[in-house]
Amino acid sequence: MQRREWLGACAGAALLPAARAAMPQPEITLRFSHVVAEETPKGLAANRFKVLLEQRSSGRIGVQVFPNAQLYGDSDEMRALQLGAVDLVAPSLSKFGRIGLPEFELFDLPFLFDDLSAVRRITLGPLGQRLLQGLERQGLVGLGYFDNGFKQMSANRPLLEPKDFVGLRMRVQASQVIAAQMRALGARPVTLAFSETRQALASGVVDGTENPVSNFWTQGMHQVQSDVSLTNHGYLGYAVVTNQRLWQSLARTERGLINQALQEALGFANQIADTQNDKALAALRQTSSVHIHRPTPEQRQRLRQAVQPVQQQLASRLGQRCIKDLQAALNKG
């Protein structure tokens, strides 16, 4: 399948089947900024939220969606939200650590989650809700979580064993945990904004990166990277966050409409995350310039063992209560 055709098919999935009636001029307009393509689970969820909220508010509440870091990138979207320059963002959970909330970095721990049901035991449980409540310390309101699935490694060679990483410059998010993961594998972590990653790969500033396949495909990274290794080593999720001042200024009915539309949109995103990654992987398999590799169980175990010290390092950063609650939630499965 050609990339353009695939993008068009995915974009259509964000629209609701009912035709939209003409809407009056909105009394409230929410600016929703994010850093990825519209055809990713995050992009589709944002567009779904827009349609749902505008319909259910009869056009009284409008939503402007700004994808692909059109307004703000990884490095400044959170600050823009705190200042009121935008009204909603959906950062990856990694980004909360650098604004004084390191507990969110538990989601970055390599090989922590076996599947998405294990993730749900955190995000839908007391620990996940406590993390969202902690956002109030930074003047933010956490509205909910959603997935982009599991991450894979890419470079211009297969990355199947710890020795394959030695000496590589690997792009990472601004997460101490992910940086420690790369160092444990023998690579050098380089923190870059997501919007800068493809160009950095093309120019040789970095040698490789980690991403769900849907991000790899929609950003055109397959045009500048020759090998994808299906390591499933880490989880990538997001939280939708708004400004506390804005949220408190809204009427209860308005907050209710926003919450209702958003929870439905996030449920939609969770349903399609695996589908989008599967579609992207199928498209990559038809791209002759990209080689797909799957580590054997033995190779994956060696990767797991190499990064085991990262979990021990994070324990002191997260605190014993967080670690205890994390282990209790995971053991319920």
Image (cartoon, grey):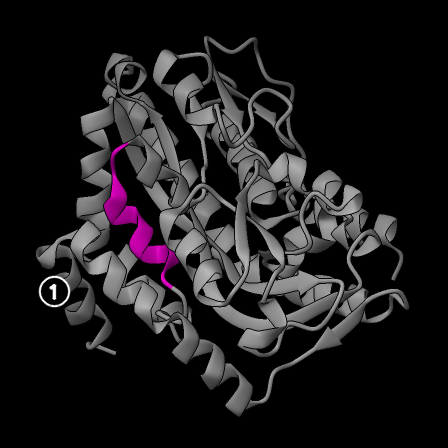
| Location of the C terminus (image quadrant) | bottom left
| Location of the N terminus (image quadrant) | bottom right
Provide residue 290's location: percent of width, then percent of height: 82, 66
Q: Is residue 208 depicted above or below 291 in this figure?
A: above
Span shown in magenta: 100-109
The residue sitting at the front extreme is 167
Q: Say left or right for 179 vs 9.
A: left
Which secondary structure is most common in the magenta stretch?
helix
Q: Residue at x 52, y 32 (%)?
A: 74
- 227, 217: nearer the viewer: 227
Q: Say left or right for 217 vs 115.
A: right
Q: Tell me where residue 81 sits by quadrant.
A: top left
Q: Tell me where residue 116 sits by quadrant.
A: bottom left
Q: Residue at x 13, y 53 (%)?
A: 319
Q: Which residue is mark 1?
A: 324
Provide residue 318's location: percent of width, then percent of height: 19, 52
Q: Is residue 106 magenta?
A: yes
- 166, 46: nearer the viewer: 166
Mark 1 lies on a secondary structure that is helix
Callout 1 environment at 10 Å: few (<14), some (14 to 19), or many (20+)? Answer: few
Q: Residue at x 75, y 46 (%)?
A: 204
Mark 1 is on which residue type?
Lys
Provide residue 211's location: percent of width, then percent of height: 59, 56
Q: Say left or right for 191 vs 2.
A: left
Q: Is residue 268 depicted above or below 262 in this figure?
A: below
